[in-house]
Image (cartoon, rainbow, N blue to C red):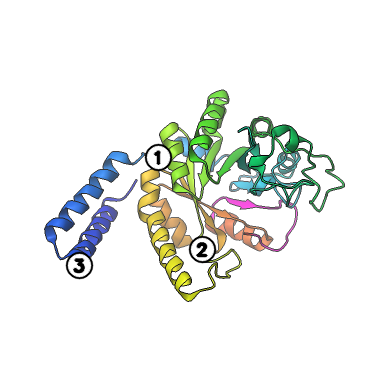
């Protein structure tokens, strides 16, 4: 939980900022008190530590850290497919990350992008295609091992969950939007497969998704995903805006968002983990969150040197695109 010292510092700083901005001690006191009451009334306590531990610190066969196949292990097999889940299990993964999307009729399926163009032989938004249309596509068509996995289908969420449970893998559900629909669908999945409460986690870049999930089912383990400067820069570091004013504005928003993730949002949502982009993780960073009872998981770790650092120095879990070989790090 939030440390008492943290609370004093945060709300004192807020009080001082409001005083400086309004020059009204009364107004600053009322606003600070209102925000404090809001936090107390609407925050979700995290799930019990032992439950979170079963998800985030499962007993690995090798005794090592949690190793999660990103999108099922997108380098080793076609991403977000049943073949990828099976391959991840064969290659020694402890978990799989699966991306949730919805068809035109609202059926939950696995797909990372908004469209099917990058990974299949089809085209168009997932949300505009019926399940029957998706099932006719070859999910291996664009993969480097397309010949080996030719004809692999886009799975429904339930098919992927059933296969992951069969393979005894921890599931990282990645939800990109549609908080109401996603929370409802996942809640039904947890009711249908209660084992998920101790073997899966719901994660998202969007705090509203996690808040809605905890509101719908407070017994689900959850995580916020974060990458500093996400609003102002692409993953390769290039600015999203071409104008100076746009870069400055989005940079300010990034600073505020980063502060909120580390001081407010995790507490409000009651998350058990932070999924942080690998380049921003250090021993001090892991310790910062450990003091708050929150696990850190890194993404996306794709070289032997990085994996050794995570396993033997940081001693935390990580997401990887391959369990078999090194290749250029992906974000």
Question: Which residue is drawn at the image coordinates 62% and 46% (left, top)?
Answer: 68
Q: Is residue 327 covered in magenta?
A: yes
Residue highlighted by disc 3: 20
- SS under mark 1: loop
- Whether label 3 touches label 2, CB < 8 Å: no
Front position among marks 3 and 2: 3
Rendered image: mark on residue 46? 1
First in sequence: mark 3 vs mark 1: 3
Question: Which residue is drawn at the image coordinates 57% and 50% (left, top)?
Answer: 317
Q: Give the residues drawn in magenta, as a range.
A: 315-330
Label 2: how many Cα within 10 Å (few below 14, some 14–19, many 20+): few
Residue highlighted by disc 2: 280
Between marks 3 and 1, how big is the CA–CA gap?
A: 35 Å
18 and 259: which one is in front?
18
First in sequence: mark 2 vs mark 1: 1
Q: Position of residue 63 (x, y in %)?
A: 61, 45
Q: Position of residue 287 (x, y in %)?
A: 43, 56
Quarter of the image for residue 237 reads bottom right
């Amino acid at each position: 939980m939030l440390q008492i010292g943290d609370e004093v510092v945060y709300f004192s700083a807020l009080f001082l900022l409001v005083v400086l901005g309004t020059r009204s001690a009364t107004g600053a006191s009322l606003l600070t008190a209102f925000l404090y009451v809001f936090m107390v009334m609407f925050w979700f306590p995290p799930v019990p530590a032992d439950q979170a531990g079963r998800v985030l610190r499962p007993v690995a066969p090798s005794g090592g850290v949690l190793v999660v196949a990103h999108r099922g292990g997108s380098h080793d097999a076609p991403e977000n497919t049943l073949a990828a889940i099976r391959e991840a299990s064969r290659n020694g993964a402890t978990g799989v990350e699966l991306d949730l999307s919805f068809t035109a009729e609202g059926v939950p399926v696995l797909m990372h992008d908004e469209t099917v163009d990058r990974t299949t032989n089809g085209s168009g938004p997932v949300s505009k295609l019926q399940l029957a249309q998706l099932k006719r596509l070859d999910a291996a068509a664009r993969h480097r091992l397309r010949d080996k996995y030719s004809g692999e289908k886009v799975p429904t969420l339930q098919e992927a969950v059933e296969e992951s449970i069969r393979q005894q893998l921890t599931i990282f559900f990645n939800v990109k939007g549609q908080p109401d629909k996603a929370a409802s669908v996942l809640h039904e999945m947890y009711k249908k497969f209660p084992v998920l409460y101790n073997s899966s986690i719901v994660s998202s870049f969007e705090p509203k998704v996690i808040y809605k999930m905890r509101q719908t089912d407070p017994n689900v383990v959850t995580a916020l995903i974060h990458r500093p400067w996400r609003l102002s820069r692409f993953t390769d570091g290039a600015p999203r805006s071409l104008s100076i004013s746009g870069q400055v504005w989005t940079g300010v928003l990034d600073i505020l968002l980063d502060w909120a993730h580390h001081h407010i949002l995790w507490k409000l949502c009651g998350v058990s983990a932070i999924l942080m982009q690998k380049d921003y993780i250090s021993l001090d960073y892991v310790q910062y969150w450990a003091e708050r009872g929150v696990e850190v998981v890194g993404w996306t770790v794709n070289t032997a040197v990085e994996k050794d650092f995570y396993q033997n120095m940081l001693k935390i879990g990580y997401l990887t695109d391959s369990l078999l070989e090194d290749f250029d790090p992906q974000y």
